[in-house]
Amino acid sequence: MIADLKREKAAQLAYDTAAALMAKREENEDLDSLATKYEPVEGSLKKRANAEETDFFAFSAQGYIAGIGAVPSVMANVFSMQPGDVRGPIQSKILGTYIVQLVERQEADLASLEANQEEWLKLYSEILNQKKSRIYQSWLNSVKAHSRIERVEPQLAYQR
């Protein structure tokens, strides 16, 4: 219970700090410049803010962004932004509070996708089969680890 309260208080502190930082943001100011205005509050473990850039990523229902993790709230915000937009604070229940800037948007190459549809479907099928195999293997290993398996020699039904 105390750990939950500490976690809740830390999350609120992070959100309040990000909100204060966004209030200091000037029009058209990018994240690198905004990060220099960060002032740690008492009790904060983070002594400085830094802007980190991710690679391009595609929309996913789980909200997975390489370098950040599964953060659906950030994913939903980013896909509604235009290049140059800065938005925040965005709070995640598990992974923290974010201020995000959309630097560049790369539209999907639909012509290439349609031209190579058969190849993409084959690749998708291979990846899906690999994932199924990994999940099955993980399940099987878990079952084996939690089971008692003994080898029983078969008895002959007919003996003279």
Image (cartoon, rainbow, N blue to C red):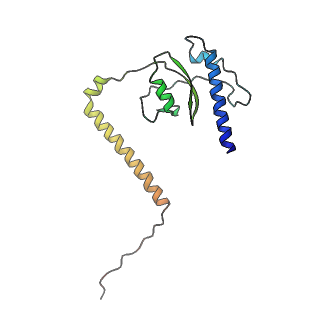
Farthest residue to the right: give it.
Answer: 42
Between 83 and 142, the one lying in front of the other is: 83
The image shows residue 125 at horizontal and vertical percentages of 31, 40
Between 108 and 137, the one lying in front of the other is: 108
Residue 49 shows in the view: no
The image shows residue 26 at horizontal and vertical percentages of 60, 11
The image shows residue 59 at horizontal and vertical percentages of 42, 29
Residue 105 shows in the view: yes
Image position of 19 (left or right of 41): left
The image shows residue 41 at horizontal and vertical percentages of 72, 26
Image position of 47 (left or right of 160): right
Occupied quadrant, residue 39: top right
Occupied quadrant, residue 4: top right
Which residue is located at x 68 percent, y 38 percent?
Answer: 6
Image quarter (top left, top right, bottom left or bottom right) of the C terminus? bottom left
Which residue is located at x 50 percent, y 30 percent?
Answer: 73
Is residue 84 positioned above or below 42 on the image? above
Which residue is located at x 70 percent, y 24 percent?
Answer: 40
Between 7 and 148, the one lying in front of the other is: 7
Farthest residue to the bottom: give it.
Answer: 160
Q: How many marks can you see?
A: 0
